[in-house]
Each structure stands twice: as structure tokens, then as C-alpha cells.
Amino acid sequence: MAEYHLKTPLSENEIRRLVVGDTVYLTGKIFTARDEAHKKMLETYERREEIPFNPAEMAMFHCGPIIKKKNGKWFVVAAGPTTSSRMELFEDKFIEFYRTRMIIGKGGMGERTAEAMKKHGAVYVAYTGGAAVLAVEAIKEVEDVYWLDELGMPEAVWIMRVENFGPLIVTIDSHGRNLAMEIMEKVEKKKLEIIKNL
Amino acid sequence: MSLTHESLVKAFYELIKKAVTELSPDVVKALENAYEREENVVAKKQLEAILTNIKLAGERKLPMCQDTGIQTFYIEAGFHTPHLEKLKPAITEAVRKATADALIRPNTVNPFTGVNEGDNTGRYIPYISWELVEGNEIRVYALPKGGGSENMCKLGMLRPGEGIKGVKRFVVEAVASAGGKPCPPVILGVGIGGGADLALKLGKKALLRPLGRRNPDERIAKLERELLEEVNSLGIGPMGLGGKTTALDILIEWAHRHPASLPVGVVFQCWADRKAFITIKGDGEIEWR
Ligand code: SF4
């Protein structure tokens, strides 16, 4: 249960060192992506075209932020994580195509994502659900936005610069462990025990 | 003092603001106690992040979570109040204003067209639940409740033969299957009896009670204590990452039931247990309590 302060771009070595239960505070660049953005980026890759930024250099954040424009500059009002399991459909391909090394979200992800993370060297980290103001505190700047007109504010890809963003808890590591799933298996067993003793 | 529309709009705006930016002391206390109790490092970190987030939200007057829910108000209105007709228009206007000021996120979507009108009003919304009571005072409760926890609510139409044991099983199963999704530590409002609608309504109304205030009926208070212990022994923990604190409290309300049915409504509330109250006196004076 070590604590790490990491900077993007993240190397494979840094990622392989992390194990389930570790805490990360992240500094550098992150990009937001929800369902629509995933679909768009995967389709672009399959057409052998390029997207306008490099996901390998940043961490991904499952988040649909509330952002305001003031004096020609974007600033973030709230930016809590969204439920990651919806992205399970896309994430193994996304990691394979774009080599993102860290994915930030809430609620955890499934076996396909865990498998891709093991193979390509990536981790899933959980950010506290609902802690929207704490996230805003760590976001220093909105650097860019892609597909805003096409996808709308929550689904667009926002590129942000963060400082000491966290606590981020490693819940899927690159060695095949998945903390949220391990806990739910234990909960299931405990549940049967409780019901038996009622 | 006469109560004007403008002063009511202002009061309801402040009520919404208070609800979304400040947690009430009973909830903060319960979260602090949970932080003290937890030994699991990950659980402690989650609770610490929540407590810091609450502190920052209060200081900066920002919504503590981006999901500010569907705007919901419970009103207990005295039979003899002269202010009844002023309430709904003032609440609706306050909701629009709070949305325009980015205090609450535009969250009302037409289920058929998918269109979000962008001002948090629409058919039946803001939702107001009315109850008539003795006296000439009006008590207004704001309960802006997020979608993540609302999605976990469950209704069980149990067979009466299953008895209170069946009720317990149903609650434990609901919490186990929700896991980390409703952003635990949660607060559970459980409605027992009545019909399908009343069971859920009682469950939701139970959430207005301060945490730690046991049901006045000793048998039910005992059931609350036992269920809380059982649910916390599941080990889901803060954010579903393991720990002793899955629920901060369980609050039960009940009604008589039909001989053939035993309805149980389980209502989940997340750690962001946003609630605020005001009292409008007969003479128009507004009290913040
Ligand atoms: S469940 Fe509650 S804390 Fe979590 S995102 Fe929804 S409203 Fe916020």
C-alpha cells in the first residue's frame, strides 16, 4: 500500500511497479472521455486516421465535467468521475490502439479491461465518487477541447493540466488483480452467511 | 409582516444553495466517526477525500457533487396557513435561478425526446410532495438527491409469511448488489408496509430524519440497529473498496399493510446526503431550522 507521486507521460516501468491498493497523486496531463468519445476515437483509428492528441502521453479520466467560459477562457466548475463500467465495451481496444497507461474513474471495470492492462502495461485507478470540488482544486488549467460542437460539453474530450490529482487508488493493476471484483466476491459470500443466520 | 413572492424565492434559493453546498452536522459527524473507526487504509483515504471535499465545498459555496439530482421538496403545511398558494411558483422560480447560477446542474430530461430543457423544471418537476398537518406553520425540506444512489432503490413485494426476517434479507441483498455504485457510505431509508407506492415514499421520507435518531418504537429501533450491523458486516466499505463503513445509518418508517402483502421500499442515499429545512410561520416569518 505504497504512495506514489507520478508525472505524465507515464512509463511502462512506473506502471508495472504499481499494485492493487497503492495510492497515486498525479501531476501532468489528463483527457476526459465518456462513451461517445471512445466510440469516436476507436472509429478514427480503424479508419487509419489520426486523432489530434496523443493518449499515450496522458491519463484518461472518465468524467463529464461542468465547464464555464469566462473572458474567453474555460474553467471547471465540477469534475467528479462517472461510472466506468459503461466504458468496458471499448476499453480493451482503446488501450491496445492508443496505449494509455492510466485510466481514472469510479466503480471499477471488468475482465476484458483488466486483461488488456496486464498485456499492455496499464492501470485503473479509482477516484472518490462525488468529490467534485476536490477535483476542481487539482485542475490547474483547461488546455484544449476536441469535438465540443459535435459531442456536447459532458461527452467532449477536455485536455486538462492537473497537479497532485488524487487520492487515486489502484484497483486494477498490470499483474491481473482487480480489487473491486475481489471485494465483491467476498461480499457475495458474506451475504449468504448473513442470510443463513437471520 | 406580509410574505412576498420575492422574499420566498430568495428563501428557497438559499435553501437549495444550503442543501447542495453544506452537509448537515449529523452527516458530517457520522462521516468523521466513520473515519475514526476505519482501519483499512483505502477506506480511510476515501473518507478523508470526502471530508476535504465537503470542507472545500462549504468554504467556496460550490456544489459538493456535480450531480445535484432532480429537485425534490417535501412540504408539511399547516391547515391554517395563509401562504399555501405562494409556495409552488416561488419554488419553481428559485430552481430556475439556482440552475442559471450553476449551483445545480440541468438534470431534467424528457423521457420520450431525450431533450433537456436546461432549467431543471418540467412535467411534475420540481417534484413537491405535500402533506397537510395541524397548525399554521409550513415546513419545507429540500432533498436534492443524485441519480447514482436513486438508481439503486428497490421495491420488494414480499410474501407476508416471510415476515421481518424476509425484510432483513431483502435489505441485505439490495445493499450487496448495489456494491460501490451508490457512492457508499450510504444512508438507507426503509419503508415497510402500506402499498407499493407508500413503502417507497416512507423510505424516502425516512431520509429526512437526522442520522442516529432511532425510531421511537423500540422494536423498530432494534431492527434498525441490527440491520445496520448486518449491512456493515458485508465489507463493501467506502466507494466499494472495502472497509467497515458501508452504511452510516438505516432509518425505518412503517405503515399498516394488506393481509396479502408485505411491501418493502429500500431507498439509497449517497454520502452526499443533501438536505435542508426551513419553517414559514403563520405571520410570514422564515426560520432556518
Ligand atoms: S451517488 Fe451521490 S456522491 Fe455519487 S456521484 Fe451521485 S450524487 Fe454524487
Image: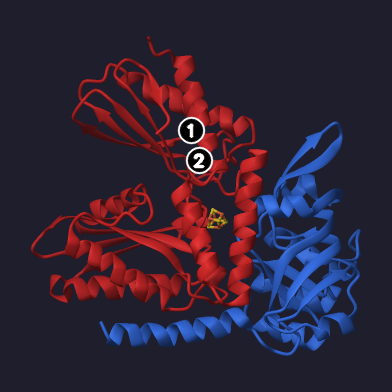
Chain colours: A blue, B red
Q: Quadrant of residue A74?
A: top right
Q: Which mark is residue A137?
A: none
Per the image, the residue denoted by label 1 is: B15
**Which quadrant of the rendered structure holds the C terminus of chain B?**
top left
Q: Which mark is residue B19?
A: 2
Considering the numbered disc 1 on the image, is that residue within a helix, a strand or a loop?
helix
Q: Residue at x 35, y 88 (%)?
A: A193
- Amino acid carrying label 2: it is Ala
Categorize mark 1 by other alpha carbons within 10 Å: few (<14), some (14-19), many (20+). many
Q: Give the x, y percent position of residue B96.
A: 55, 29
Q: Are marks 1 and 2 in contact (CB under 8 Å)?
A: yes
Q: Residue at x 53, y 60 (%)?
A: B32
Total numbered badges shown on the rendered structure: 2
**Which quadrant of the rendered structure holds the N terminus of chain B?**
top left
**Residue occupying the far left of the picture:** B259
Q: Give the x, y percent position of residue B87.
A: 38, 24
Q: Give the x, y percent position of residue A40.
A: 77, 61
Q: Chain of mark 2?
A: B
Considering the numbered disc 2 on the image, is that residue within a helix, a strand or a loop?
helix
Q: Residue at x 24, y 23 (%)?
A: B136
B246 relative to A91 in the view: left or right: left
Q: Quadrant of residue B61?
A: top right
Q: Chain of mark 1?
A: B
Label 1, label 2: how far apart the Cα atoms are: 6 Å
Q: Residue at x 21, y 62 (%)?
A: B220
